[in-house]
Every structure is written in C-alpha cells, then in structure tokens.
C-alpha cells in the first residue's frame, strides 16, 4: 500500500509556503462568498481555472481534467435550476441543488487545499513559518495539522476496511458505528503523535536555539506573480462587493 | 526544584503536537456535523451535534492536557481553520474567550478534577455558536443571500428559525448535549483507552 505523505509530489514551479497560504485565504474567501455580482462571478471562474493550472503544475493531468469537468457539470446544473426547468421543490430538484451547491462552493477549495498539502514539505512549511517570526506555540500545532490531514484520511480508510470486514456499518446502529470508528482512530493518532514527538526531538525542535533549515524558502518571480494576482483578485472582490 | 517546576509549567513540543492532533480531529468532526446544515433546522442546531459527538476526543484530549493554554490554542486554531473555510470570524473571538475560560476552570482543578472537566467542556462547547453569530446578528438579511443558491424552501425555513430567542435555545441545547457528550466520552475512555494504556 502506498502511503500518501504530504509534500512528496513533484511540481514544475514551486511556490513559497507563504504564497500558498495567501492563495488559500484569497481563493477560499472568493469561492465561498454568495454574491450575485458579475465581477465576482468572473473572479470565481478565474480562480477555478487557477486551481486547474496548479493541479497541472503537479502533473496531475487526469485529476485536473476530472475537476474541471465536474465543476462545469455543476455550473450546468446551476443554470438548469435557475432557469426553472426543474422544480426546485421536487425530490430530484432538491438533490440536484445540494450536489450543485456542494461542488460549486467546496470543490475548488478542496482541490487547492489538496495541492497545498501535497506540494509542501513539512520542513519547508516550518522554515517559512519561522521566517514569519511566529512563536513555536503556533508553528508546531500548525505543522502537525498540516501533516495530519492526509494521515487521518488514510487511517480512516484502513479502519473503514477493517470494520467492513467485521460487518460493522452505520446502518447497524449509529452509536456503535461512531464508537467503532472513532476509538480506533483516536488510538492510532495518539500513537502517531507519540512517534511524531520522538521525531521532532531528533530534528532538534525541542531546543531553544534558532533552527537552521536545509530547505531554502524565499520569494521568487513565481511568488511575486502569485502575489500580484491575489492582490488584484482581492481588489476586484471588494469592488464587486461594494458596487455589485 | 524550583527550575524543574518552572520547566514543567512550560509547554513542551509533545504538548504542542497533542494540540495539533486533536485540533485536526475536532475540525473534522466539526466539518462533518456542519454539513448537516443543508437542512434549515440543522443550520441552527449543528453546534448541538458537535457538542455531543466531540465529547469522546475532547475528554481524551483533556486528560492529556496538563499545561495551561492548550485548550485555548486548540479552540483558536480550529476557529482559524474554519474561518479559512468560510465560517464567521466571530468564531475566533468566542474560541479565544471561551477556550481561555475553559482553560482557567480546568486549571483550577489542576486538569485532574472530572467535575471541572465537565464544566469546562460545557463552557468550551458554546464557542461554536460564535461561528453562527453573523446569522443571528444579520437576521433575515443573512438568509436572503442564500435564496438563489439554496432555494426558497431553505431560506423560508431558515428565516422562521432565526431569532435571538432561538440563539438562547441553541445555547441551552449545546450545554445539555455537551453534558451528555462528556459522560459518553468518560465511558468510552474507561471502556477503551484506559485498558489500551493510551491514557
């Protein structure tokens, strides 16, 4: 079984972790907003394409095409709902509305988060956070959170398999269903946590001295371009919010 | 002796890693519970569901907490992550304030008293309402912005439910659910984690 580790994917153009953080904030804010303004609508489309390009940057061609196709289908569904050719109150209309809503609001953000998680090494991330002079009390939990999302989904799918083998499903009792998933998950993540603290010690995170890093993080032309794009995007977004 | 005590009061890397792990778990539970908000009633009552289910990981977390500030950091980090996902920023404020109060309550019992843990968890659970505050402050204007996307049925259902009275009802329900959640957590802790030597 291959373990999806964060930051192990190859990228063509690499960005600074701080740039990626800015990307996450700006793109998510725009994608999640519920404004009817045409400016913001175009901005959303631009960001959807940006996320597509970032996935291509990771050479995930199949995934990026699938993402664009699904998003386009959701837009089509949205169009059908707004035009009123399907009754939004009917069962089918309700299901379609929920699916469209989830895809339009969440898919780009989820794909962007996936890109950030898989294209950044944890040590790169810590080095960048240190350059921002954040205290250790925030840097370490953040780095753990960062590393843990892939781990949790991985652990969960293994537990899910094990429970399927024992025929424990949510259908057989919601309480049992939750207990038999949550408990093994908590046991395994606490164990992983212990291992992580041992690993952190060997990497010198426990010392008070300033750490040096093997990773070189810094701003390059690509970061400047991304920053300019995000600033322009924010300006457009605010304009759209004010003038509709 | 004195310096050793000083040392033990400071947060170690291990503590911070524990905070990070439980933040992720809490965040995931939050997110799954908040997804039920597609139904108008649950858009108001999802904090109740969170308080109930998050009892298990939170009790385990609290037994591992020994340093002041860990609960506050967890609450703030969760709120920041949720803010990035588009929930209201008031969650960061309520997370900071209620997390700190929960920390103070549990600290007064040296993080060992179960009664203090119960009170602390009930207080802590209320922070989730902060993520809903924009809805209660803006009232129907908040619901209207979803009309095109979520449809008339959802918005009309939601508008009937938004009021400050309802906010109080949610707060009470959260407290009750947290109470039940913390006892479920305690039972699970006894049944599984103590035997497995996790605690």
Image (tube, rainbow, N blue to C red):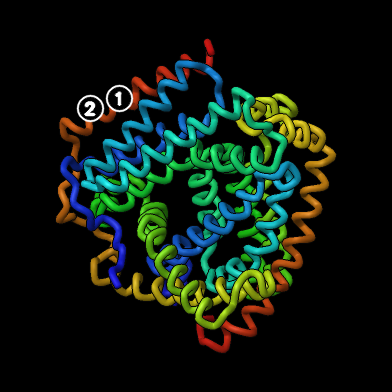
Query: Residue B43: percent from the left, percent from the top?
Result: 69, 43
Which residue corresponds to the image point at 49% horizontal and 72% vertical from the top-left?
Answer: A160
**Left or right, residue B16 beside residue A167:** left
State if disc 2 and disc 1 touch (CB < 8 Å). Answer: yes
- The subunit letter for the residue under badge 1 reads A
Residue B107 lies, with reference to residue B156, above or below; the image says below
How far from the left and from the top, in percent, is residue A135? 37, 50
- As helix, strand or loop, the secondary structure at mark 1 comes to helix
Residue at the spot x=62%, y=43% of the render? A95
The residue pinned by badge 1 equals A229
Residue at point 43%, 63% (across, down):
A153
From what the image shows, is residue A201 above or below residue B144?
below
Residue carrying label 2:
A225
Task: Please name whichever residue, B171 or A229, is drawn nearer the observer in this view of the structure.
Answer: A229
Snapshot quadrant of residue B72: bottom right
Q: What residue is at 60 percent from the left and 49 percent from the top?
A: B35
């Amino acid at each position: 079984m291959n373990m999806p580790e964060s930051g192990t994917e190859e990228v063509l153009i690499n960005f600074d972790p701080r740039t990626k953080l800015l990307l996450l904030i700006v793109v998510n804010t725009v994608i999640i907003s519920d404004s009817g303004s045409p400016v913001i609508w175009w901005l959303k489309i631009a960001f959807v394409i940006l996320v597509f390009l970032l996935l291509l940057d990771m050479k995930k061609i199949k995934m990026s095409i699938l993402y664009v196709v699904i998003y386009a289908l959701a837009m089509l569904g949205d169009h059908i709902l707004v035009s009123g050719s399907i009754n939004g109150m009917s069962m089918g209309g309700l299901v379609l509305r929920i699916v469209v809503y989830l895809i339009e609001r969440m898919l780009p953000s989820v794909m962007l988060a996936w890109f950030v998680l898989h294209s950044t090494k944890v040590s790169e991330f810590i080095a960048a956070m240190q350059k921002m002079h954040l205290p250790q009390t925030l840097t370490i939990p953040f780095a753990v959170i960062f590393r843990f999302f892939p781990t949790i989904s991985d652990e969960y799918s293994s537990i899910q398999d094990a429970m399927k083998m024992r025929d424990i499903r949510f259908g057989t009792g919601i309480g049992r269903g939750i207990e038999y998933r949550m408990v093994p998950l908590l046991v395994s993540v606490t164990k992983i946590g212990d291992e992580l603290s041992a690993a952190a010690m060997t990497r010198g995170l426990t010392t008070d001295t300033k750490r040096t890093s093997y990773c070189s993080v810094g701003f390059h032309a690509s970061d400047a371009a991304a920053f300019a794009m995000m600033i322009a995007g924010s300006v457009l977004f605010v304009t759209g919010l004010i003038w509709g | 002796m004195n310096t050793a005590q000083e040392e033990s009061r400071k947060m170690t890397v291990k503590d911070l890693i524990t905070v990070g792990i439980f933040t992720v778990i809490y965040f995931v539970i939050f997110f799954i519970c908040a997804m039920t908000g597609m139904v108008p009633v649950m858009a108001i009552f999802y904090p109740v569901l969170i308080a109930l289910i998050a009892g298990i990981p939170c009790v385990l977390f609290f037994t591992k907490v020994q340093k002041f500030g860990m609960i506050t950091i967890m609450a703030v980090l969760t709120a920041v992550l949720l803010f990035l996902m588009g929930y209201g920023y008031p969650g960061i404020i309520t997370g900071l304030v209620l997390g700190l109060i929960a920390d103070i309550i549990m600290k007064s019992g040296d993080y060992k008293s179960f009664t203090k843990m119960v009170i602390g968890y009930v207080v802590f659970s209320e922070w989730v309402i902060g993520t809903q505050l924009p809805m209660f402050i803006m009232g129907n204007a908040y619901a209207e912005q979803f009309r095109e996307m979520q449809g008339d049925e959802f918005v009309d259902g939601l508008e009937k439910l938004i009021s400050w009275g309802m906010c109080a009802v949610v707060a009470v329900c959260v407290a009750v659910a947290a109470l039940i959640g913390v006892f479920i957590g305690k039972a699970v802790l006894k049944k599984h984690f103590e035997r497995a030597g996790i605690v």
